[in-house]
Image (spheres, rainbow, N blue to C red):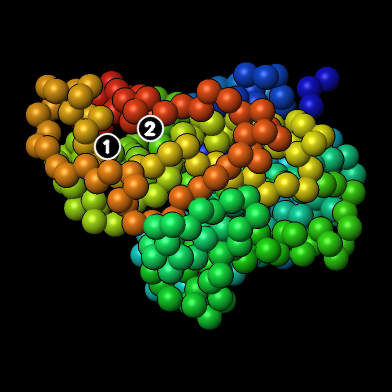
């Protein structure tokens, strides 16, 4: 009998890669999404009898995930990816902070109450839970590690432009607090990617257009380099990120760890340089490529993550950008 893994927010960029890898390894996967229509659409794309879904319409509800664990009491591992990412935030607390925090605690409560066989919960955190915006943009000599915590306060997080940074920190904090206070039957690990690049998991999904940071690559293809004034930092490839999530529950030694993945620097100039090299027919105009050591933002050291999870031969930015552009061209979204 296949081991059952629950993946929340399964229609998202990272989660679809996790689902695809799990199914390739013969796990039985239960996913959650917010609408039946979208869940069914993506289930048809996944097209695997080992996959099923449960609709969870409201992340911030206290009992949001109860039905998942009541219907599937054989769930052994949980990967909680779902988190609000609102393009334009009008009410930071209502639209970002509360859904992220309550969504995390509600999945933990449900797994504790109705998931007798749950052994490990892995939560998708973020680099921004490890580093505040003031430190990131003002910390050219600052190195962020797995142990780092963002210094952002809840009050600061009520500003629309940095609400996401706060939502990821306080959602992860809530998870560790739950573990300490409730002492559930499962262990916990968190996995925080930096800026994520790489192709989408399924071409049929890619046809719907770019998501997340892939929008930066799409803008570059349209010769719009406006993001080059703000996009600086470390990157991770979505295929490495999804693999890391799986290892975070497969390996006993991963319990209790905060994982962080960064694999070098990224900037719009670097992306343009890569696309110009590999796709000269697109005739992109050149732009300044700022040297990595001149980017003026914090960097990461993820040695503990790579050691504990045994992640080697990480996918380079060049490969991730090339694969992303090739997919966009192949499916006709550019």
Residue at 25% in and 30% down:
274
Tell me, yes or no, if residue 39 can be seen here.
Answer: no
Considering only order in the chain, which callout, 1 or 2, is on the residue closer to the N terminus?
Answer: 1
| Quadrant (top left/top right/bottom left/bottom right) for the C terminus | top left
- Count of labels in the image: 2
**Where residue 172 sits in the image (x, y, percent)?**
65, 59
Q: Name the residue at 39% across, 65% down.
A: 138
Q: Is residue 247 left or right of residue 155?
A: right
Residue 197 seen in the figure: yes
Percent coordinates x, y for residue 97 in the rendering: 56, 68
Which quadrant of the rendered structure holds the N terminus?
Answer: top right
Per the model, the C-alpha gap separating discs 2 and 1 is: 8 Å
Q: Secondary structure at mark 1?
A: helix
Q: Nearer the viewer, residue 67 or 99?
A: 99
Is the C-beta separation of discs 2 and 1 under 8 Å?
Answer: yes
Residue 223 placed where, x, y %?
Answer: 14, 41
The single residue placed furthest to the bottom in the displayed view is 155
Residue tagged by mark 1? 271
Of 80 and 162, nearer the camera is: 162
Q: Is residue 88 left or right of residue 280?
A: right
Q: Position of residue 264 (x, y in %)?
A: 43, 39
Q: In front: 294, or 191?
A: 294
Q: Taking 130 as reference, is 157 above or below it?
A: below
Direction from residue 311 to residue 121 in the image, left or right: right
Q: Residue at x 49, y 77 (%)?
A: 156
The residue beneath circle 2 is: 317
């Amino acid at each position: 009998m296949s081991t059952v893994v629950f993946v929340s927010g399964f229609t998202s960029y990272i989660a679809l890669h996790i689902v695809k890898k799990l199914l390739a390894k013969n796990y039985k996967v239960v996913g959650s999404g917010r609408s039946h229509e979208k869940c069914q659409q993506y289930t048809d794309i996944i097209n695997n009898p080992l996959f099923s879904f449960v609709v969870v319409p409201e992340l911030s509800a206290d009992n949001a995930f109860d039905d998942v664990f009541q219907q599937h009491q054989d769930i052994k591992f949980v990967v909680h990816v779902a988190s609000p990412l609102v393009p334009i935030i009008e009410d930071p607390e209502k639209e970002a902070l509360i859904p992220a925090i309550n969504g995390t605690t509600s999945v933990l409560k449900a797994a504790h109450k109705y998931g007798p066989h749950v052994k490990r919960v892995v939560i998708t955190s973020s680099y921004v839970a490890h580093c505040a915006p003031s430190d990131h943009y003002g910390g050219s000599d600052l190195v962020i590690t797995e142990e780092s915590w963002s210094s952002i306060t809840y009050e600061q997080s009520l500003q629309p432009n940095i609400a996401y940074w706060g939502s990821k920190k306080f959602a992860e904090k809530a998870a560790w607090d739950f573990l300490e206070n409730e002492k559930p039957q499962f262990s916990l690990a968190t996995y925080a990617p930096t800026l994520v690049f790489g192709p989408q998991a399924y071409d049929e999904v890619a046809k719907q257009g770019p998501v997340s940071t892939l929008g930066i690559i799409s803008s570059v293809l349209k010769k719009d380099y406006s993001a080059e004034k703000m996009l600086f930092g470390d990157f991770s490839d979505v295929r490495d990120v999804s693999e890391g999530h799986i290892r975070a529950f497969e390996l006993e030694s991963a319990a209790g760890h905060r994982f962080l993945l960064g694999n070098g620097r990224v900037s719009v100039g670097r992306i343009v340089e890569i696309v110009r090299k590999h796709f000269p027919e697109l005739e992109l105009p050149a732009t300044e490529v700022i040297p990595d050591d001149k980017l003026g933002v914090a960097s990461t050291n993820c040695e503990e993550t790579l050691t504990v999870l045994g992640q080697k031969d990480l996918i380079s930015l060049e490969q991730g950008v090339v694969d992303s552009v090739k997919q966009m061209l192949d499916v006709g979204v550019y």
